[in-house]
Amino acid sequence: MRKFDTKIQHLKYKVLREVARLAWEDKLLENLMDIPGKLVPGKEATMRCCVYKERAILGERVKIAMGGDKENPNVIEVIEIACDECPVGGFEVTNACRGCLAHRCEDVCRFGALSFDDNHVAHIDKTKCKECGACAKVCPYTAIVSRKRPCQNACKVKAITMNEEKSAKIDNSKCIQCGACVYQCPFGAIQDKSYILDAIDILKKSKAYTAESDYHAYAIVAPSISSQFSYAKLGQVVTGLKKLGFRDIIEAALGADMVAMSEAKELSEKGLLTSSCCPAFVQYIKSAFPHLVEHISHNLSPMAVLAKYIKETTPGAKVVFIGPCTAKKAEAQLASVKPYVDAVLTFEELQALFDSRDFDLSTFEEGVLDNASYFGRIFARSGGLTDAAVQAMKEQNIDFEIKPVVCDGIEACRMALLKLGKGVLDGNFIEGMACVGGCINGAGCLTHGEKNKTEVDKYGREALEKTISDAISILK
């Protein structure tokens, strides 16, 4: 069974797996230069002009797998040598233009960028074109097309431009580190930095590996894990995590239960709120709508709330968060979160960790993961947070009518925030998620799609705790 959606994910995974395998054996530095040659042994294996360029690119992938550029605060990096072959022309007129007399494209262009030759064929003046796309929409022959790069199309916050060498360039002041460009780049030229070596170091120095250690390692897993690792049962994944060296595996959904209770109270007190669970959404507000920052919930995310609880109740504990989100890697570096979360891994990286130890999850006995309620678990998909907030109101006897605006995808979030800024939003609670569909389609997922929502809802219904109050009662 295929473990990944795309061949690019598989290539990224192979690099991570080899880096992790050598790290477990304490042989990484002495064998570092051998990884590209091992993964691309000959010319028949290359996708590029030559095997040497392919190996050079793999060398850059290895660097990112080891933590990337320490001088760059962004967790998303561009491998410039791998960024090529993509058209960069913007909107262009194709040979489908029939030289019609209507000239609708000219009429709709507000910038005077359209002109016509003697045969009435349209031409676009790039110095005047604003890339609005109005001409393409009205052309009856669909003769005007967008030649934007996939990364630019994927980036809804317009953080990606081209540098002088025509490679992608990320504006860190706009980037929300959602990873959409990482998943959509067909050359794998944009990647998220990996902290897999940090996780391995934590595990190797924990009590699971050495009696001299003064701490245990704990894994917090996002509820969207229920839709991943489809070749094994969730209980077998839990067992795999324990075999890696984690003392206990705790659902981030339990943190979601905690957040739901707190956020419901905060909403009732303030009367207007935007959610704080998705770090990419929160960063989007801060960078694009700074005047709305006051409305962001003051609650930490489920990851941070739960990690904080673990650290406060288990002195010396080390916490590794595992989920679908690249932006979580950036969140873990915030001053408000860094004391509680020691490393963040994506599901892609977890798969590499498992395979670096040659684990066959399908042969393991099933462990148990039953810490959270139905409502905490459905945080993984769009609308889940809102459902949980409504339930939290009921359980706390709070008399407040929630009028939610559920947004998945930055474009939907942008429209809601624009309305909020203008005072015309028909609602008092914005649930914002940067990824379409929610966390179930995060950039670090092994697989993406509608089936993920079905799996998460099923997982939620299997929760032993049927109320949020019951779930968080174990914390008292």
Image (cartoon, helix red, strand yellow):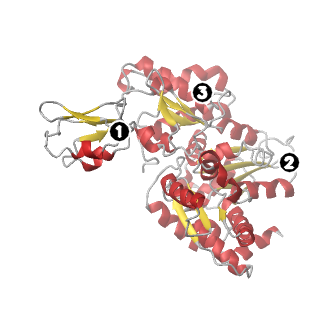
Local secondary structure at mark 1: loop
Residue 255 x %, y %: 71, 62
Placement of 344 over or under 46, stated as above or below: below
Q: In the rendered structure, which amino acid carries the disc numbered 2?
A: Gly
Residue 78 x %, y %: 53, 30
Q: Residue at x 79, y 55 (%)?
A: 308
Q: In the rendered structure, which amino acid carries the disc numbered 3?
A: Lys
Q: Residue at x 36, y 35 (%)?
A: 129
Checking the image for residue 393, the label placed there is none
Q: Nearer the viewer, residue 278 or 40?
A: 278
Per the image, the residue denoted by label 1 is 111
Upstream in sequence: badge 3 or badge 1: 3
Q: Tell me the crowding category of disc 3: few under 14, some 14 to 19, or many 20 or more residues within 10 angstroms, Cα based.
A: some
Would you identify the image quadrant in which residue 77 lies? top right
Mark 1 or 2, which is nearer the eye?
1
Per the image, the residue denoted by label 3 is 63
Q: Quadrant of the C terminus?
A: bottom right
CA distance for labels 2 and 3: 30 Å
452 lies left or right of 206: left
Q: Nearer the viewer, residue 223 or 78?
A: 78
425 lies left or right of 376: left
Would you identify the image quadrant in which residue 212 lies? top right
